[in-house]
Image (cartoon, rainbow, N blue to C red):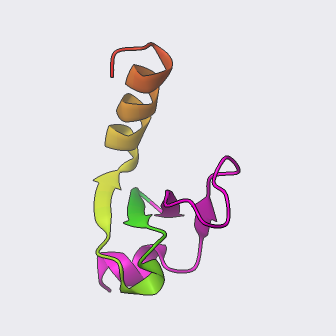
């Protein structure tokens, strides 16, 4: 199974994204989180992170480190 297949069924777009605004979508599967560009939809390359990496990223954002 590819990373794209693993995350394809569970994508979520930010509620702050407007209809015409570009944003990212986040998808997850057991143990991984995928991020893709909403402008490209299913044709977008997917950046894949472990759930631990994603949690560390979110913590850094919430703490103002990024």
Q: Residue at x 67, y 58 (%)?
A: 18
Q: Residue at x 61, y 60 (%)?
A: 13
Compared to residue 54, the image places residue 8 above or below, namely below
- Please give the range of residues in magenta: 1-30
Q: Residue at x 45, y 13 (%)?
A: 63
**39 or 65, which is in the foreground?**
39
Corner quadrant of residue 53: top left
Q: Return the x and y of residue 34 as percentages of the image width and height.
A: 40, 62
**31 or 64, which is in the foreground?**
64
Q: Residue at x 60, y 66 (%)?
A: 20
Report whether 11 appears left or right of 44.
right
**48 or 29, which is in the foreground?**
48
Q: Which quarter of the rendering shows the C terminus?
A: top left
> Residue lying furthest right in this view?
15
Report whether 63 appears left or right of 65.
right
Q: Return the x and y of residue 2 as percentages of the image width and height.
A: 29, 83
20 inside magenta stretch: yes
């Amino acid at each position: 199974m590819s990373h794209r297949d693993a995350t394809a069924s569970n994508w979520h777009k930010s509620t702050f994204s407007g209809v015409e605004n570009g944003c990212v979508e986040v998808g997850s599967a057991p143990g991984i989180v995928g991020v893709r560009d909403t402008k490209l939809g299913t044709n977008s390359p997917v950046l894949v992170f472990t759930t631990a990496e994603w949690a560390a990223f979110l913590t850094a954002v919430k703490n103002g480190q990024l």
